Image: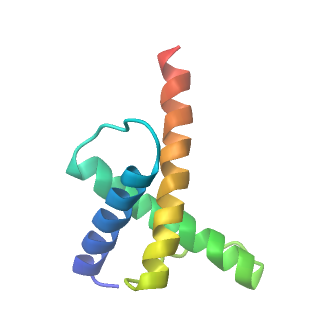
Amino acid sequence: MNIIAWLILGLLAGYIAKLIYPGHQGGGPFATFFLGTVGAFIGGSLYYFLTVGSLQLVATSLSIPGLFVAVIGSIIAIFLWGLIARNTNN
């Protein structure tokens, strides 16, 4: 996938995940892009594992199903980031 598609997928997935996830996540456009990109890898790898049965680091494509998987992965990434940030603040 080319870099423009990565930017679009990362921004869209991160933005939609931040809208869906309850509470305030903070962060600007870079954090949204980062969470969306990480979410695309988490969602793509999880989808690949559930369908093929082997664990491999893959990302989703810029399509409606790919965006859906990337949003789910981004929600997981926001949840994990919240756990890490909460533990470091204590």
Q: From the viewer's perspective, is residue 36 above or below residue 80?
A: below
Q: Residue at x 53, y 13 (%)?
A: 90
> Eyeballing the image, is 63 above or below 82?
below
Position of residue 88 measured from the top left corner of the image (x, y, whole percent) = 50, 22
**Closer to us: 67 or 23:** 23
Q: Residue 10: x and y, percent?
A: 33, 66
Q: Residue at x 52, y 72 (%)?
A: 69
Identity of the residue furthest to the right in this view? 53
- Give residue 22's position: percent from left, percent from top: 46, 42
**In this view, 19 is above or below 12:** above
Please say which color scheme the image uses: rainbow
Taking 3 as reference, is 88 left or right? right
Q: Is residue 27 left or right of residue 49?
A: left
Residue drawn at the location 35% of the way across and 85% of the way down: 1
Q: Residue at x 32, y 58 (%)?
A: 15
When asked about the image quadrant of residue 27, the answer is: top left
Q: Is residue 46 visible?
A: yes
